Amino acid sequence: MAGRWAHLLLVGLATVATPALADVKAGVDAWQQGDYARAISEWRPLAAAGDPDAQFNMGQAHKLGRGVQTDLSAALEWYRKAAGQGHLRAEDNLGLLMFQQGDRAGAMPYLQRSAARGEPRAQYIVGTSLFNGDLVGKDWVRAYAFMTRASASGLPQATTSLQQMDKFVPEAQRRQGLALAADLERQSKAGALATGPAPKPQGPVVRPAPSSVRTTSLPPSDLNRPLAEPVAQPRTAPPPVREATKPAPRAVAAIPAPAKGGAYRIQLGAFGEEANARALWSRLTARVSGLSAYQPFLVKGGNVTRLQAGPLGNAADAGRLCASIKAAGADCLLKKM
């Protein structure tokens, strides 16, 4: 899913040595410039040596297929190593990816902690499970609270599910859920604003509030698929068959036709390896109806290959095409040639 939770900023411990900080930052700078191969070369030795920020970044790179081949097993392993050292964003991504890969029971403890911290996608999944009584005990008050918070964060699936919940959750429980949602929001803000030194824990180190940016804004996935079923109707006697359905997609204007000789293109990403650009084009054309009518352009600059598509006749058409790309969960920028 592209958008506001597609951007993660991670921070390091104040006790991290200065040379390691510089190396991680060098990888961040390379990533932001689209030089993913150099970013990987900076992060890999640090990750192998145990740096949790570098481990998280390696997990992101393997999940997105930037600078390395897409490898979700490797991404899980790097996330697990970083999460084991108290890296909360790694724990968020570990639970979400485990759930996507089918290990729903194993993912639930991570997702419950992420939901309590305010991660909208985790709140949506946990809220759905609490409503249906799947993997966890049924609790409509907490389900309504988590779904309310996820919807307030702008997650479309959560808004759809919350509307379904309104049909079945009694008014008294909805009021309790709204009150709990307000408490969860206050707790999340209080945790984010906590400052000052904390006692050294006996177990994994929990990262303090941000002191310096150590990683770039890496989206959680280039093409997010739905993470959980929409809320199902409560069972009655005789119990209806509950079908797994996908959340209703947001309405997106029809894709405009290519314009021969048009002055606009859209840019879909920048890659250190041309093969990754071609792989993204294959995935997007399979998921975005009509995109295959456009010509892909592999624009090389130094060690970076930028994937663009076009041509389009005007900025409005380019914006409509970008909207369809973003609805599929990918990044998109307008380019005037």
Image (tube, rainbow, N blue to C red):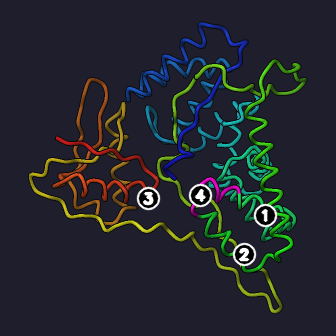
Residue type marked 4? Leu
CA distance separating discs 3 and 1: 26 Å
Q: Which mark is residue 155?
A: 4
Query: Can you say whether 42 is above or below 123 in the image?
Result: above
Find numbered disc 4 in the image and state the secondary structure of the residue it sits on. Answer: loop
Across and down, in percent, residue 24 comes to: 55, 18
Find numbered disc 2 in the image and state the secondary structure of the residue it sits on. Answer: loop
Find numbered disc 1 in the image and state the secondary structure of the residue it sits on. Answer: helix
Bin the neighbour count of mark 1 within 10 Å (Cα to Cα): few under 14, some 14-19, many 20 and up.
many
Q: Which mark is residue 143?
A: 1
Task: Please tell me whether mark 4 or mark 3 is closer to you in this view.
Answer: 4
Query: Can you say whether 306 is above or below 237 in the image?
Result: above
Write down the residue under mark 3.
Answer: 327
Asked whether disc 2 touches disc 3, contact meaning CB atoms under 8 Å apart, the reply is: no
Q: Residue visible at 64% across and 56% down?
A: 152
Bin the neighbour count of mark 4 within 10 Å (Cα to Cα): few under 14, some 14-19, many 20 and up.
many
Between residues 238 and 67, which one lies in front from this camera angle?
Answer: 238
Asked whether disc 1 touches disc 4, contact meaning CB atoms under 8 Å apart, the reply is: no
Q: Earlier in the sequence, mark 2 or mark 1?
A: 1
CA distance separating discs 2 and 1: 12 Å
Write down the residue under mark 2.
Answer: 166
